[in-house]
Amino acid sequence: MKRLHVHVSVKNLADSIRFYSALFAAEPAVTKTDYAKWMLDDPRVNFAISERGQAKGLDHLGIQAENADELAELGQRLKAADLPHLAQPDSNCCYAKSDKHWSLDPSGIAWEAFHTLDTIPTYGEHGRAATEATATSCCSPVQQLTSTVAPKASTCC
C-alpha cells in the first residue's frame, strides 16, 4: 500500500517539531539536527520537515511505494501520460537511499514517487548546506524538470 509524502521547509525545526507532534499526537520517527519525519498510519502519510529549502512552506509532495513494483507502476504512469519525468535510481537524500521518479504538476509543484531502500547518515549525497542556492531540496530536481516544461504566463492575485 502506498503512502502520501509531504515535505515542508520550516524556519525553526524545534518549534515545528513541537507543533507537528501536537497535531499528530506523535513524536517523529526520525529526528536529525536539520530534519524530522513522522510515519503516520492515520492518516497514512510520510510527513517530513527540514530547514533545507530555499523558501519556507511546501517543498514537495510525493507517493512512497512499498516495493519496486509499486514504484515502477508510478513511474510508468508519468511516462504514459507524457508528463515531465526524471528517474533517479540510487538517490541519496533525506537520510535515505531511494529509487525515485520526479515530476512537476501544472502549477510547478514537485512530486516524487519513491521506494526507500536504506538509511544513510547524511541529509544528502553532497551534504548541501541549507543556504546553498540550488533546487528547493537536496533531491528535488525542480530546475531540471522546469526546463522540460513550457514557461507559464505570470498572473496577479
Image: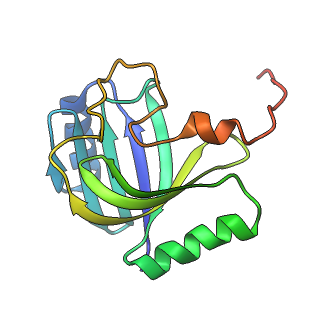
Whether residue 27 is visible to the viewer of this picture, yes or no, is no
Q: Position of residue 70 (x, y in %)?
A: 48, 78
Using the rendered view, name the quadrant where residue 96 is placed: bottom left
Q: Residue at x 26, y 25 (%)?
A: 12
Chosen colour scheme? rainbow
Give coordinates of residue 79: x percent, y percent.
Answer: 69, 66
Front-most of 44 and 59?
59
- In the drawing, does residue 81 fall left or right of residue 111? right
Q: How many marks?
A: 0
Give coordinates of residue 148: x percent, y percent.
73, 42
- Closest to the observer, 53 or 116: 116
Q: Tell me what residue is drawn at x 64 percent, y 55 percent.
A: 85
In the rendered image, which quarter contains the C terminus?
top right
Q: Position of residue 86 (x, y in %)?
A: 58, 53
Quadrant in which the N terminus appears: bottom left
Residue at figure coordinates x 25%, y 40% from the top left: 123
Above or below, 77 against 143 in this view is below
In the image, residue 112 sits, relative to residue 150, either above or below, namely: below
